[in-house]
Amino acid sequence: MHVDVLIIGAGVSGIGAAAQLRERLPGKTLAILEQRDASGGTWDLFRYPGIRSDSDMFTFAFKWRPWESAQALADGHQIRDYLRQTAKDYGVDKLIHYGHKVTGAAWSTEDKQWTVSVETSDGPTEITARFLWNCSGYYDYANGYQPEFAGLDDYEGTFVHPQHWPEDLDYAGKKVVIIGSGATAVTLLPNLAGEGRAEKVTMLQRTPTYILSRPGQDAIASLLKTAPFKLLGKLPFKRVREKVGHEAVRWENIALTVGTYQIARRAPGVVKKVIRDQWINGLTARGGRPGMTKDEAIAYVDKHFNPPYNPWDQRICFVPDGDMMKSIREGYAAVVTDRIKTFVPKGIELESGETLEADIVISATGLNLRLFGGLDYTVDGEPVSLPEQMAYKGLMITGIPNFAYTIGYTNASWTLKADLVTDYVIRLLDFMGENGYDVAAVTRDPSVEERPFMDLASGYIQRSLELMPKAGDRAPWTAKQNYLVDMKALGAPVADGALKFS
C-alpha cells in the first residue's frame, strides 16, 4: 500500500487529523495504522470506574466538532462515543487499519518517501508514504509505570494497575487502598467510595497534589440550553447562533485555563490560597453525613493537600462538583500521606509504623512515556537519535524530513494543541502541493540553546526527559505551552525560513 499521508494512531489526535485531511485536502490519499483492535486511544484503553476527562470538554472536543452537552468533565465512554461518531461522520472509520503495529520507519531521500515496517496478524508488511504523521501520543499503551514494592509477593489481596483494570473486579464492601495522588487516583476515589460501594477507600500518597474543584456543568453551556435560547434556535440563522454559542463557551474555558495557568506561574500564592480555601470549605460543608469542624479541616488540608511545590510545576487535578471532598467529608474515604515500607499479607506497612489493611490495592502510580510510539527512525540508512535533535514549533523534528507529530498540552486540553497542529500540517501539505515541493525538513540551528522538551516536574516526564528531543530558547524552537502564543506561531505562513523545501 502507498499513500500520500500515513497517520499512526486512531485516538483523539489521529481521528482529528484524518477528519480534517478528508475535509480540506480530499485529493490526498491517507491511511491510519492502529496497533489495537479498536479506535479511541486512551478513551478505549482505560476502563476503570469513573474514568473521565480532566480537562473541560469544550476545549477537549475538536474546535470544528462542538461538544453539545453542558457537561464539562465527561465520562470516558462519552468521549469514546464522540470520537467514533466523528470518525464515522467524516469517513475516517473506513481508513483505519486495526492490528497494525508500527515497528520502524525509514526515510529515503532518493525515493522521497517513507517505508514503514508493520506487524500484523498475517505477518510483517511494509507501507510507503510521502508524509508520515505520528499521532500515537506519548505514553506506553502496553504497560503503566509500576515501582518495585518490597514484600509485594507476600500480599494476599488483589493488586491492580488502572491501565489494566479487570472487568470482574468486585470492590463492594472491601477495604481499598489507592497508591498515588494524580488524576487517576482522584477520579477513582469518589467512584469507589460511597453507599453500597467499597467499605473504605484510602488514597495513599507520598506527596500531595493540587486538586481543584470545578462545576460539573458549564454555566454558559447550560444557559444556552434553557427555553429562551432554544426558541432563538428556531429563528433564522440558527447555525450562526449555534456557532456563536459554541465559541462563547469554548473561549470562556480557554480563558479560564490559560488565565489560571498564567496566574499560577506569576502569583503562585494566590492560587495556593484559592485551592486551600476551597478544600477547607468543601470539608466543612453541611449536607448528608456531618462534615469536619473548621479546625479539623485546616489540619487535614495542611497535611494532605499542601504540596511542596507551586501550582502547575506539576499538573493540577480537577474534580467535578467537589466529589472527592464530599467522599472524605462524609467518611467514605480518607487520605494518608506517608511512604511505603513494605507490603504485608493483609495490606501495607508504612514508614510511620502504621499498617493500612487492604483487600484491594490499586497502583495508580502513573504512566511510562513512549515518545512517538517508541519507533526506530532511520534517514537514508542512518538511525536518528532523538535526544540529539530539536523540536520545531512543537510539531516537527530536526533531521527527520516529511514528518510531523501531535502532542497536546500538559497544562490545558490536549486537543487545543492538536487542533493547531492539524491546521498547520494541512497548510504545510497544501503549500508543498501548490509549489511542487516533495520534501520539507528542518535543520538544527547550533546557536539555539537547549531547553527541556516538556517543562513539567511530574515524575512521568522527568523519568524520560533524557530520551526526548530538545526544545530551544527562542522561536520557532520554543515550547511555550500557551495556546494564545501558539495560535500566532502556528497560524503564521509555513515558509518562515527555518523550514526548508526541495
Image (cartoon, rainbow, N blue to C red):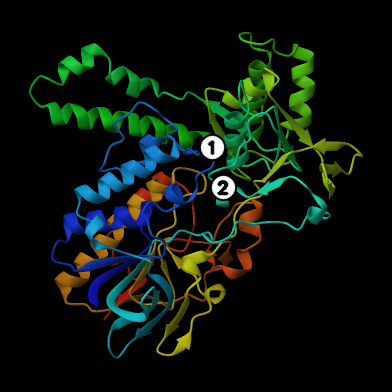
Residue 104's x, y, as percent?
43, 78
* Distance Cα–Cα, label 2 vs label 1: 9 Å
Closer to the camera, 41 or 384? 41
Instruction: Estimate the x, y position of residue 166 in percent, counting from the top left.
Output: 56, 47
Circle 2 residue: 165
- Residue flagged by tag 1: what amino acid is it? Pro
Q: Is residue 60 visible?
A: no
Pick whichever of labels 2 and 1 is earlier in the sequence: 1
In the rendered image, residue 352, in percent from the top left (x then y), is placed at 90, 39
What element does badge 1 sit on? loop
Q: Name which residue lies at 22% across and 59% down.
A: 94
Q: Report the residue at 48% width, 34% height from top.
A: 259
Q: Nearer the viewer, residue 125 or 90?
A: 125
Kindly identify which residue carries mark 1. 49
Q: Which mark is residue 419?
A: none
Tell me if residue 259 comes above or below residue 236 in the rendering.
below
Q: Quadrant of residue 254?
A: top left
| Left or right, residue 452 beside residue 66 | right
Q: Is residue 153 above or below residue 432?
A: above
The picture places residue 423, in percent across and down from the top left corner, at 28, 55
* Position of residue 366 in the picture relative to residue 385 (left or right): right
User: Closer to the camera, 386 or 43?
Assistant: 43
- Quick one: quadrant of the C terminus? bottom left
Mark 1 crowdedness (10 Å alpha carbons): few <14, some 14-19, many ≥20:
some
Which residue type carries mark 2? Answer: Trp
